[in-house]
C-alpha cells in the first residue's frame, strides 16, 4: 500500500434492509429488501429502518436532543468508528467528519414552524431550532463522537454522498486528517412525502412515487427512503501504522454536472460515461477489469434508461459480461446514496459476491445490460467495483472500490 | 487567484456601491418588509430593498427564488469582471460551488405553510432543491459543467465554498471555479434566532461592551477563482491571492462556540501554517463577529491564542454591524469585502462601538475607515451552528 491510497477501515449503516452491516450483508446475499410499498397511505410505507436503540451507550438526555436523522446517523457512525477501532477523542484534530444529505433538517423545520404558528413567535420552541439546519446531524455527530478535525456538510439532491467522499479523500491526501468519518443520511420526512406528491403532480403522474424497481421493464419511479450510512476512510499508512484492517481501497471521485436549470434534468448519458471513464482511468483499469458496476438506477423510467445508455457506451463489447447491480431497492431513493452504496460495495468485496438487484421482477431486455436479479447473489470474479452516481440535482459522478 | 468579484448587499447592489458605503460607515439595517415581524424582539434586519434580476428569460425568472437571484446576479458581476466566459476554457473545467445555510427558506416557508393548510404551493416554493439550486442556476447561466457542490455548514457555508474551489483547482480537477453563496431573510430563521434569544432589539454592534446580540441580513457574493498560471496566460485581473483554507469542528455544542475557541484556533493556525506565514504578517482580521457575547468572546480567545504577542493592536473588523448576519452568505460577502480592502489598502470600520468589551482585548477595532493601511494579508473566518469553523487567508493580488 502507498501513502496515496485511501482505505476503508470501518462501516456502519441503518436502513430498511438492515440496522448494522451484518443484517445488510445478509440482505445482499439473498436480494431481500426490507422495503414495503403497499397501500394508499404513503406515510405508512416501510422505507425506513426500525427505530434505532442505543441502550446505555447514549444517555436519554442526549437522545432527547436528537431528531430521527441524527439518531440514524449517530447509530451508523458508532458502528463504523467501533469497527475501525478509532477513538476520535484521542486523535486531537486529526479525525474529521463530512456528511452528505438531501433533506436533513426538513422534518424538524416543519415541527419548529408549527410551534411558531400554534403558540406565537414568543413561544416558538427554541430547542428545535438548532436541528432545523441542514448540518444539524453533522454537528451532533462531531459532538457525540468528539470529531474535531476537518468538517463540512454537503447538501444536494443527487450527489451529496459523492461530494462527501471526495472531500474526505482530499483532506486525508493533503495531510489535514489521519482519518475521516464520512456519513450519508436522508430522512423520509413529512415534507419529503409532501414533495413527492407535488413533483408527481407537476409531472402529470398519478402514482406519486413508483414501486422502486430498478431496471425493471415496468418501472414507474422511486419513493425516497430513510437511511444513514458511514464509512471510515484513512490513509493506508495511518491504517497500517495502527494495525487497522483495511476493508477496501476507495479510489478518486470523478465529477461533472450538467448546465441545466432546476427542474430540467437532461439525463445526459455522455456525461455519465465521461465521469465513469475518468474514474477508471484514475485507477488504470479497463472496463473488462470490473467485478461489477453498482448502478444508481432507482426505477425511474428515464433515468434508468440513461444510465443503461451510459454503461453500454462505457463497457462496449464487455457490456453483456459485466454484472450490473442497482442497490436502491434495498433502501429507497436517497440523495446521499453514494455512501450507503459504498458500504454495500465494500460488504460485497468482503463477501466475494455480486448482489441481486432487489425488487427487480422483470429485467428490461431493451437495456442491453447483464443486470443481476433473483434471490441469490453470484460470485464476484474480480475485486473491483465501479459505482455510478447521478440525481435530479444535475450532478454525475463515479468512484471505484477495490479489495485492499 | 481571485479574478472576479460580485456582491449584492443591503449597502448596494454591486461591489463598488457596497464597499464605498461600507467605508463611509453607512448602516444597511432597516425595517423588514418581507414578512411580519410582529411578536419578535426586533423589526430590523439587513434587508435589500430591491433585489436585482439576473439576465435570464422570464420563464426562468418566475422559478427563481430570492436567494437564487442574489446568487446569480453576484455571479454575473464576478464572471463579467474576470472575463471568464471570453476565455478558452472547457466547460467541464469550471466548477461551481455556492454555499447555503438557510437559503431558499423564504420560499420554503411558504411551502411548509401551504402543506400545513392543505393548499398547493407555487412551483418555485418547493423546497426540494432550494439550497443547491443557486449553484445550479449559476452553472446554467454560463454553461459551466464542472463539478458542483453546495456546502451547507450554517454560517460558514459560503466560506467553505470558497475553500473548496481552491482545493479543486489545486487538485487539478478544474482550472477555474465560481464560488460564493447567497442568503435571503426568511421568517423561519428570524423566528428561530428570536426563539433562542440571539436577536438584538437594535442593529448589532460586534465586540462592543453594550452589545445585545445579533442582527440578521441577506446578500449574495461570488468570486471567480483561477489557477495563477491560467489567469496570467489570459490576462485576467489579479484581484487577490487565496493562499490557504481550513475547516474544523468544535465538537462542543450545537449553538454555543467552544468557550476557548478551540476549533476556531485550529483553523486559523492551519491557515497560517499552510500559507507559510507568521501571525505578524496578518494585517487585518475580517472576523465572524456576530455580536453575541459568547461568540465574540470565543473568537477573541482563539485570536489571542493564535496571534500571541502579535495580537496587540491587530486590526479586527466585523461587517455585520453594517449589513447584519447574512448566515450562509456571510463568509463570501465578507471575504469579498476583504478582497476589496486589499485592493484599496483600506481597513473598513466597525459601527457602533463606543467602548470595546474588555474580554475582546487586546485588538484594535477601527471605528473609521483607515487608508494606506499597508495590508498584505487578511485572515477571514466564519463559524456556524453545529460547531463548524472555516478560515482562509487572502493576500494582495500583485505579489510576485
Image: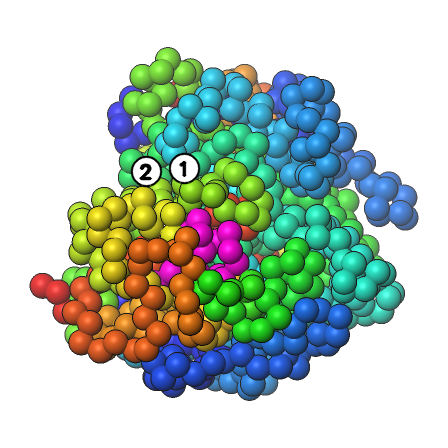
Q: Image quarter for residue B375?
A: bottom left
Q: Is residue A302 left or right of residue B22?
A: right
Q: Residue at x 12, y 65 (%)?
A: B399
Q: Residue furthest top?
A: A243
Q: Mark 2 lies on which chain?
A: A
- Expressed as whole percent of the image width and height from the top left, the position of residue B172 reads 27, 51
**Number of the label disc, if any, that sits on residue A372:** none
Closest to the observer, A196 or B116: B116
Name the mark on residue A149.
1
> For the residue labelled by badge 2, is the local secondary structure a helix, a strand or a loop?
loop
As helix, strand or loop, the secondary structure at mark 1 comes to loop
Q: Is residue A274 left or right of residue A333?
A: left
Q: Which residue is drawn at 20% across and 72% down?
A: B373
Which mark is nearer the camera, 1 or 2?
Answer: 1
The location of residue B177, given as percent across then percent down, is: 34, 62
**Which comes before the other along the chain, label 1 or label 2?**
1
- Real-space Cα separation, disc 1 to disc 2, in angstroms: 8 Å
Which residue is identified by label 2? A176
Residue at (25% x, 60% y) in the render:
B313
Residue A402 at least partly seen:
no
Question: Residues in magenta?
Answer: B285-299
Task: Say whether residue B73 is left or right of residue A206.
Answer: left
Residue A401 sits above or below residue A121 on the image: above
Amino acid at each position: 500500500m502507498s501513502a496515496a491510497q485511501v482505505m476503508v477501515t470501518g462501516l456502519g449503516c441503518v436502513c430498511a434492509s438492515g440496522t448494522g452491516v451484518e443484517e445488510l450483508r445478509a440482505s445482499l446475499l439473498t436480494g431481500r429488501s426490507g422495503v414495503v410499498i403497499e397501500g394508499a397511505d404513503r406515510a405508512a410505507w416501510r422505507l425506513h429502518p426500525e427505530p434505532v436503540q442505543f441502550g446505555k451507550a447514549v444517555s436519554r438526555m442526549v437522545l432527547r436532543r436528537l431528531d430521527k436523522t441524527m439518531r440514524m446517523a449517530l447509530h451508523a457512525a458508532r458502528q463504523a468508528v467501533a469497527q475501525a477501532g478509532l477513538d476520535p477523542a484521542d486523535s486531537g484534530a486529526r479525525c474529521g467528519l463530512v456528511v452528505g444529505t438531501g433533506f436533513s433538517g426538513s422534518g424538524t423545520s416543519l415541527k419548529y414552524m408549527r410551534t411558531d404558528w400554534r403558540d406565537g413567535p414568543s413561544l416558538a420552541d427554541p430547542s428545535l431550532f438548532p436541528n432545523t439546519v441542514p448540518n444539524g446531524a453533522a454537528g451532533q455527530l462531531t459532538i457525540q463522537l468528539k470529531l474535531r478535525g476537518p468538517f463540512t456538510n454537503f447538501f444536494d439532491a443527487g450527489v451529496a454522498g459523492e461530494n462527501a467522499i471526495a472531500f474526505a479523500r482530499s483532506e486525508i491526501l493533503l495531510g489535514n486528517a489521519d482519518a475521516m468519518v464520512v456519513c450519508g443520511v436522508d430522512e423520509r420526512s413529512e415534507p419529503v412525502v409532501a414533495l413527492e406528491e407535488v413533483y408527481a403532480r407537476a409531472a402529470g403522474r398519478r402514482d406519486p412515487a413508483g414501486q422502486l424497481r430498478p431496471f425493471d421493464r415496468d418501472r414507474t419511479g422511486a419513493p425516497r427512503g430513510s437511511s444513514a450510512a458511514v464509512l471510515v476512510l484513512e490513509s493506508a499508512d495511518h491504517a497500517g501504522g495502527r494495525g487497522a484492517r483495511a476493508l477496501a481501497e476507495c479510489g478518486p471521485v470523478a465529477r461533472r454536472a450538467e448546465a441545466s436549470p432546476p427542474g430540467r434534468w437532461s439525463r445526459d448519458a455522455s456525461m455519465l460515461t465521461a465521469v465513469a471513464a475518468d474514474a477508471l482511468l484514475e485507477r488504470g483499469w479497463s472496463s473488462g477489469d470490473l467485478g461489477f458496476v453498482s448502478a444508481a438506477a432507482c426505477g425511474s423510467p428515464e433515468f434508468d434508461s440513461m444510465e443503461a445508455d451510459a454503461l453500454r457506451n462505457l463497457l462496449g463489447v464487455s457490456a453483456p459480461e459485466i454484472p450490473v447491480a442497482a442497490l436502491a431497492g434495498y433502501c429507497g431513493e436517497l440523495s446521499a446514496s453514494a455512501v450507503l452504496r459504498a458500504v454495500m460495495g465494500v460488504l460485497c468485496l468482503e463477501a466475494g459476491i455480486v448482489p441481486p438487484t432487489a425488487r427487480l421482477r422483470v429485467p428490461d431486455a431493451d437495456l442491453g445490460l447483464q443486470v443481476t436479479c433473483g434471490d441469490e447473489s453470484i460470485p464476484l470474479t474480480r475485486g473491483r467495483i465501479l459505482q455510478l452516481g447521478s440525481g435530479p440535482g444535475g450532478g454525475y459522478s463515479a468512484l471505484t472500490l477495490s479489495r485492499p | 487567484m481571485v479574478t472576479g468579484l460580485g456582491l449584492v448587499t443591503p449597502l448596494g447592489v454591486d461591489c463598488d456601491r457596497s464597499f464605498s458605503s461600507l467605508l463611509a460607515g453607512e448602516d444597511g439595517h432597516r425595517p423588514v418588509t418581507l414578512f411580519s415581524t410582529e411578536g419578535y424582539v426586533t423589526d430590523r434586519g439587513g434587508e435589500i430593498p430591491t433585489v436585482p434580476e439576473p439576465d435570464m428569460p422570464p420563464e426562468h425568472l418566475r422559478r427563481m427564488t430570492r436567494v437564487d437571484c442574489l446568487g446569480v446576479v453576484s455571479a454575473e458581476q464576478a464572471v463579467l469582471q474576470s472575463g471568464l466566459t471570453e476565455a478558452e476554457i472547457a466547460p467541464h473545467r469550471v466548477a461551481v460551488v455556492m454555499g447555503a445555510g438557510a437559503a431558499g427558506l423564504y420560499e420554503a416557508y411558504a411551502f411548509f405553510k401551504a402543506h400545513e393548510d392543505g393548499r398547493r404551493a407555487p412551483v418555485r416554493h418547493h423546497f426540494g432543491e432550494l439550497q443547491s439550486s443557486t449553484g445550479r442556476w449559476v452553472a446554467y447561466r454560463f454553461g459551466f459543467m464542472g463539478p458542483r457542490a453546495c456546502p451547507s455548514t450554517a454560517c460558514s457555508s459560503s466560506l467553505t465554498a470558497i475553500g473548496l474551489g481552491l482545493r479543486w483547482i489545486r487538485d487539478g480537477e478544474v482550472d477555474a471555479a465560481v464560488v460564493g453563496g447567497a442568503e435571503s431573510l426568511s421568517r423561519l430563521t428570524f423566528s428561530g434566532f428570536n426563539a433562542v434569544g440571539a436577536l438584538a432589539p437594535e442593529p448589532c454592534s460586534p465586540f462592543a461592551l453594550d452589545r445585545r446580540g445579533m442582527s440578521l441580513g441577506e446578500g449574495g457574493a461570488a468570486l471567480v477563482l483561477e489557477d495563477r498560471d491560467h489567469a496570467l496566460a489570459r490576462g485576467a485581473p489579479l484581484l487577490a491571492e487565496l493562499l490557504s483554507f481550513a475547516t474544523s469542528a468544535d465538537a462542543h455544542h450545537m449553538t454555543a462556540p467552544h468557550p476557548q475557541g478551540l476549533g476556531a484556533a485550529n483553523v486559523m493556525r492551519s491557515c497560517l501554517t499552510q500559507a507559510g506565514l507568521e501571525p505578524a504578517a496578518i494585517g487585518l482580521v475580517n472576523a465572524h463577529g456576530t455580536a453575541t457575547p459568547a461568540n465574540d468572546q470565543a473568537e477573541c480567545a482563539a485570536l489571542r491564542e493564535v496571534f500571541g504577542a502579535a495580537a496587540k493592536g491587530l486590526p479586527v473588523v466585523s461587517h455585520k454591524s453594517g449589513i447584519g448576519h447574512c448566515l450562509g452568505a456571510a463568509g463570501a460577502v465578507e471575504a469579498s469585502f476583504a478582497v476589496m480592502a486589499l485592493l484599496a489598502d483600506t481597513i473598513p470600520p466597525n459601527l457602533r462601538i463606543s467602548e470595546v468589551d474588555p474580554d475582546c482585548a487586546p485588538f484594535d477595532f477601527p471605528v473609521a475607515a483607515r487608508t494606506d493601511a499597508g495590508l498584505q494579508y487578511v485572515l477571514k473566518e466564519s463559524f456556524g451552528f453545529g460547531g463548524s469553523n472555516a478560515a482562509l487567508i487572502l493576500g494582495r493580488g500583485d505579489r510576485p
